[in-house]
Image (cartoon, rainbow, N blue to C red):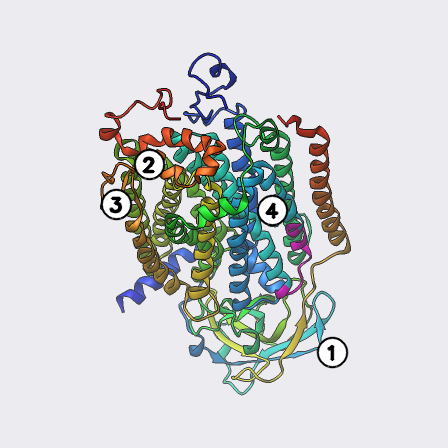
Amino acid sequence: MEISSNGAETQPKFALPVDSEHKATEFRLFSAAAPHMRAFHLSWVSFFACFVSTFAAPPLLPIIRDNLNLTATDIGNAGIASVSGAVFARLAMGTACDLFGPRLASASLILLTAPVVFFTSIASSPVSFLLVRFFTGFSLATFVSTQFWMSSMFSAPVVGTANGVAGGWGNLGGGATQLIMPLVFGLIRDIGAVKFTAWRIAFFIPALFQTLSAFAVLMFGQDLPDGNYKRLQKSGDKQKDKFSRVFYHGITNYRGWILALTYGYCFGVELTIDNIIAEYFYDRFNLKLHTAGIIAASFGLANIISRPGGGILSDVMGKRFGMRGRLWTLWTVQTLGGVFCIILGQVDSLSASVAVMIIFSIFVQAACGLTFGVVPFVSRRSLGVISGMTGGGGNVGAVVTQLIFFKGSKYSKETGITLMGVMIICCSLPLLLIYFPQWGGMFCGPSSAKTATEEDYYMSEWSSDEKDKGLHEASLKFADNSRRERGRSVHSQTLPSNATPPANA
Amino acid sequence: MAARVLILSSILTFSCFAEICYGAVSFSSLERTLVVTASHRQGLLIAGEDKITVAWGLNQSFPAGTDSTYRTIKVQLCYAPISQVDRAWRKTEDHLSKDKTCQFKIVEKPYSNTNETLEWTIERDVPTATFFVRAYALDQHNNKVAYGQNTDTKKTTNLFDIQAITGRHASLDIASVCFSAFSVVSLIGFFFAEKRKGGKGQQ
């Protein structure tokens, strides 16, 4: 297996500067150069489309609830269903990415869930409504393929940024849909359709958008900087891994479980708010559908800068303080998100609610970006499974939160929001327990044991048999590239990251 | 008390954005001076097809001059209690600006001192629910000053059921099925195309 040397023979191949794994070390937003930036644009647009579809119903609920004769319980159940499908879909997607590559995995899921969005137009009862929302929600698993794809295309210095921008701009769909759907509905109704028909026609827009984005991914996308999985596996450049081993090393890593829980209380909260906020403003402040949609949209629209901001912040803190900086920032930002959530449930006036909601959205979404600044380092072999667990945990958080606080008429929405804030603060505490032997944790420094290096950590995922076969090579490269997570003061004492890999490779 | 005043003034201020004029009145302070009746055919009424004949007028047992402040009459279709269960967006509140009981306007016209009737075709955006009819008398500032309804105070008598339109059309159904089939078939098509290309890889 060749190890590419730094120099002219590999550089001209890519439009962006790359590391030894051919991952880009720079993130140029306004470029669409293949393969790195093109993958970025394809992944965020297709993920955006899935978010638009999944949350297309909430802004139109005031119409749908009358057409389908829904009760508050029916609406709550459908909201829970919309985010629960993705819990296991995300985990399955993570594994599929590890095995088949993000391009095929995501495009397949998107094209298989598009029919359900089309069928939303035919829904005629609370049960059918719940079913379409449940199956549409599966498409949110494209989040995992997005993060996986970005982690495969972008190197450590920019992986937080790439993940944050792709994730954030995809999540934007949850906000954009609150604007798009009432607008499309209004247009169709003004053309002459009756309310109860107009909303049905409106659903064709997200469905078509979803289908077209999947086509684009299939036609223009590529799994890795060097090519697609199938071709690389055939030529021997990428080893085909075993599902059982990949899965095992993912689920036995306790950090994956902690991140799954904490992600449930930043991203899960974001999903919950996407489901309830339009109705909250419509009912509590007696606004018009259109106005409630605009306000609700501003929550999701903050994603355009807040989640990428979180990713960038993670990279900045990682550069200066290493992994410990990333963890501290994540915990601080997420806890502050919880504080603002409590305040949101308490304020009584419309303008104060909108202001607090925007601040709250910035913190909560930045926490999502910060989480995925940590995830790429938890495992190299089982990156997909860890991403899937974390992503799935996000949806579990949404399910649990909606079940406890927003189902039926037990709590008023205001009280539910306040209690959700308290839960955010409590469920962010486990971050204190994350520890990497080579980098340390929030309260402990790195271990001084001889076996506490990046190589030891990532090689522990491979057995000696597998190492004999040379299956671990990619992980070795990654371990070397991840040495920057020690932070600037320590890093300057070790080899500079652009040097050739150490002799034991 | 200060908080209530603050809430009230906020609601009044922002009501201008919502383009609805709220009067600071509670329902229990209104007098039931109007007599309202609603008649319709037997059975379940269909939205968009069936008609309701509404009649309203001043209750003659009230002294003359009771209706001196009435300028407009607003007749509305209102939800019966059974259709409000587990639906907070239809809740009855005493404070009129927060009350969501009556959401459909049958007619709004200048008040006249005679008994009036109207034959109203049930509009197609009325949902499936149980209803009654209520009429409000408004003064020159558009504040509600009196009311009447075709049911009793507990809203248990003279209720009627309306069945909404589904909103579905055959053309919509067909389009949904066709587009869905198209997505799935194209996915299968892509897989075949990839297999054909044999491990050449896609760019």
Q: Are marks 3 and 1 on the same chain?
A: no
Q: Residues within 10 Å of mark 4 (few under 14, many from 20)?
A: some
Q: Are marks 1 and 2 on the same chain?
A: no
| CA distance separating discs 2 and 4 | 36 Å
Residue bearing mark 3: A442
Q: Are marks 2 and 4 on the same chain?
A: yes
Residue bearing mark 1: B41
The chain identifier of the residue carrying mark 1 reads B
Q: Is residue A52 above or below residue A19?
A: below
* Amino acid type at mark 3: Met
Residue A184: numbered disc:
4
* Amino acid type at mark 4: Val
User: Looking at the picture, how far across and down is residue A243, in whole percent?
Assistant: 54, 45
Q: Do residues under tags 2 and 4 come within 8 Å of each other at their CB atoms?
A: no
Mark 2 or mark 4, whichever is nearer to me = 2
Mark 3 or mark 2, whichever is nearer to me = 3
Q: Is residue A226 left or right of residue B30?
A: right
* Amino acid type at mark 2: Leu
Q: Earlier in the sequence, mark 2 or mark 4?
A: 4
Q: Residues within 10 Å of mark 2 (few under 14, many from 20)?
A: many
Q: Is residue A30 left or right of residue B56?
A: left
The chain identifier of the residue carrying mark 4 reads A
Residue bearing mark 2: A313
Query: Please, what secondary structure does the residue beneath circle 1 have?
Result: loop
Q: Do residues under tags 3 and 1 come within 8 Å of each other at their CB atoms?
A: no
* Amino acid type at mark 1: Arg
